[in-house]
C-alpha cells in the first residue's frame, strides 16, 4: 500500500547518496517504533518496505484462540475466520495493519524522526568521504568572508572552512569568488563534520607541484623537504630518481611555465627550488640560495652550522626579516648562523692561539710550563678551560699564581 512517509522519502534515494537498504532499514525501525507506541511492546510485527514503489506492508502475527485475553497478541477464532475460513484454534494469523490508522500525530512524529536520521546519515557520509580526501586540492565557491575564517561550498553541497591561520598572508577574497585549497583536517563536531582546508600548509605546495609537474606525480622526481612561510617564501628540495632528468629544471618547466603557474596561485610567493643532497655541506649551501657561502663549518653533534660569506652576500643569506636563513635552517635541520669572512678569520686566529702548545707560550716561566704540562695541560685552551680554581690542585700552584697564569694566557690570545 502507498504511504505518505514512504512516498515522500523515497525521493531521498534519488536526490541524495544514501543506500536504499539503509533507508529501508531506518523506515522499518521507525514504523516498528510507531507500532509499539500504538499497540504496545509485545506485538510480533513484520514490516516490508519497497523504496522503488514507495510501498509499505505491515503484518502483525496473532495466535488464534477461543477467548481473547490479550488483543495485541491474540485474535478470536470467529474473527480470524472472517478473512481466513480455514483458521483453527492454535493457528498463526497474520493481520494486515494500515499505516493510515496511526493518526496524524504519530505520522508527523515519524517524519520528523526520519528527517533527523537522514541528516545524521548525510553527516556521516560527508565525514567518511572527506576524511578519505585529506591531502586533496579542492575548488570551493566563497560563500561567506569573516574576520577569522572563510566559508566555502564544495561540489555545490558541502561546506568547508578556511581559518585565518591557514590563509596566505595579505590575500583578499570576496563572496562569490572561487578558491583552491588543500583538505587539511576533517573532524566531528556537534553541528556535523567540520572540514578544514588550508592554503598555508606545506601540503598545499606539495599538491600544487604534483599537479603541475608530471614527473613528481609519476614518482620520477621526489619532494624531499619543504620549508615555508606562507605569503613570503618557500624552499623546496627535490630529488630525481632518473639521472637523465634534472629535478629543478623539470619543476621550473619550459620558459618557467610550471613554476609561474604555482607562483601565481600563491599570490606571487617566492619559491626557491633546490636539488636535495645527502651531503650536508652541499645541501646547506644550496639551501642558503640565492646567497653563495664561501665555506660551511658544520658541528654535527650540536647540529649547528656557521656559513661564511662575503659582506655583500650576508644580507642575501639572512633575507628580509631573517626569512631566508630561517627557511634554510628548517629545510636542512641545522641551526644556521651567518658570519662575515673577516670575522671568520679573526675567529680562526683566536682558535689557533688557543690551540698553541704551552711550550710555545712566552708569558709564563719555564717552571710554570713544566708544572702545567706535568698536570696534563698541553695547550692554552686546556688551561683556560680548567680555570684558576682547578689549577690550584697542581703542586706548587696557589690561587694567586693560578690567577696570574690565567691572566697571562688570556693576554696572549687577545
Image (cartoon, helix red, strand yellow):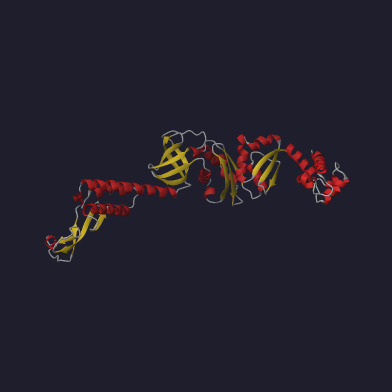
Residue placed most toward the observer, 36 or 389:
389
Q: Is residue 77 visible?
A: yes
- Nearer to us in this view, 149 or 2: 149
Where does residue 178 sit, x and y in percent of width and height? 44, 37
Name above or below for residue 172 compared with residue 273.
above
Nearer the observer, 24 or 209:
24
Q: Is residue 99 left or right of residue 341?
A: left
Task: Name which residue lies at 46% across and 33% down.
Answer: 147
Residue 43 image position (x, y, % from top left): 23, 58
Residue 187 percent coordinates (x, y): 44, 46
Instruction: Please identify the residue farthest to the right as the structure is shown.
Output: 366
Q: Tell me: 179 left or right of 36.
A: right
Asked if residue 331 lies left or right of residue 413, the reply is left
| Percent of width and height locating residue 236 | 58, 44
Q: Is residue 84 visible?
A: no
State the residue in front, 372 or 206.
Answer: 372
Residue 348 horizontal side relative to residue 203, left or right: right
Label total for image:
0
In the picture, the quarter occupied by the C terminus is top right
Picture quarter containing residue 153? Answer: top left
Amino acid at each position: 500500500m502507498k504511504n505518505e512517509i514512504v512516498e515522500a522519502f523515497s525521493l531521498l534515494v534519488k536526490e541524495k547518496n544514501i543506500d536504499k537498504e539503509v533507508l529501508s532499514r531506518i523506515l522499518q525501525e521507525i514504523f516498528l517504533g510507531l507500532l509499539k507506541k500504538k499497540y504496545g511492546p509485545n506485538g510480533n510485527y513484520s514490516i516490508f518496505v519497497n523504496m522503488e514503489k514507495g510501498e509499505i506492508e505491515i503484518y502483525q502475527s496473532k495466535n488464534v484462540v477461543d477467548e481473547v485475553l490479550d488483543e495485541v497478541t491474540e485474535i478470536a477464532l470467529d474473527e480470524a475466520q472472517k478473512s481466513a475460513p480455514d483458521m483453527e484454534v492454535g493457528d498463526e494469523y497474520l493481520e494486515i495493519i494500515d499505516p493510515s490508522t496511526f493518526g496524524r500525530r504519530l505520522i508527523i512524529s515519524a517524519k520528523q524522526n526520519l528527517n533527523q536520521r537522514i541528516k545524521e546519515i548525510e553527516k556521516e557520509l560527508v565525514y567518511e568521504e572527506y576524511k578519505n580526501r585529506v591531502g586533496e586540492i579542492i575548488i570551493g565557491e566563497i560563500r561567506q568572508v569573516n574576520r577569522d575564517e572563510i566559508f566555502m561550498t564544495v561540489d555545490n553541497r558541502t561546506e568547508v572552512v578556511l581559518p585565518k591561520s591557514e590563509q596566505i598572508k595579505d590575500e583578499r577574497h570576496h563572496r562569490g569568488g572561487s578558491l583552491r585549497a588543500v583538505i587539511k583536517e576533517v573532524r566531528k563536531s556537534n553541528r556535523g563534520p567540520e572540514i578544514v582546508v588550508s592554503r598555508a600548509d606545506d601540503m598545499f605546495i606539495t599538491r600544487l607541484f604534483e599537479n603541475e609537474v608530471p614527473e613528481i606525480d609519476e614518482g620520477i622526481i621526489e619532494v624531499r623537504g619543504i620549508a615555508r612561510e606562507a605569503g613570503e617564501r618557500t624552499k623546496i628540495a627535490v630529488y630525481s630518481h632518473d639521472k637523465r632528468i634534472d629535478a629543478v629544471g623539470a619543476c621550473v618547466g619550459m620558459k618557467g611555465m610550471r613554476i609561474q603557474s604555482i607562483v601565481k596561485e600563491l599570490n606571487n610567493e617566492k619559491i626557491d627550488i633546490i636539488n636535495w643532497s645527502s651531503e650536508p655541506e652541499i645541501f646547506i649551501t644550496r639551501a642558503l640560495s640565492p646567497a653563495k657561502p664561501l665555506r660551511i663549518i658544520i658541528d654535527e653533534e650540536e647540529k649547528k652550522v656557521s656559513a661564511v660569506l662575503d659582506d655583500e652576500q650576508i644580507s642575501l643569506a639572512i633575507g628580509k626579516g631573517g626569512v631566508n636563513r630561517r627557511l634554510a635552517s628548517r629545510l636542512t635541520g641545522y641551526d644556521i648562523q651567518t658570519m662575515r669572512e673577516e670575522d671568520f678569520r679573526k675567529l680562526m686566529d683566536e682558535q689557533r692561539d688557543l690551540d698553541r702548545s704551552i711550550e710555545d707560550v712566552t708569558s709564563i716561566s719555564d717552571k710554570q710550563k713544566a708544572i702545567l704540562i706535568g698536570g696534563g695541560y698541553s695547550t692554552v685552551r686546556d688551561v683556560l678551560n680548567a680555570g684558576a680554581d682547578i689549577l690550584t690542585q697542581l703542586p706548587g700552584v696557589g690561587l694567586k699564581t693560578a690567577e696570574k697564569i690565567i691572566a697571562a694566557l688570556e693576554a696572549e690570545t687577545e
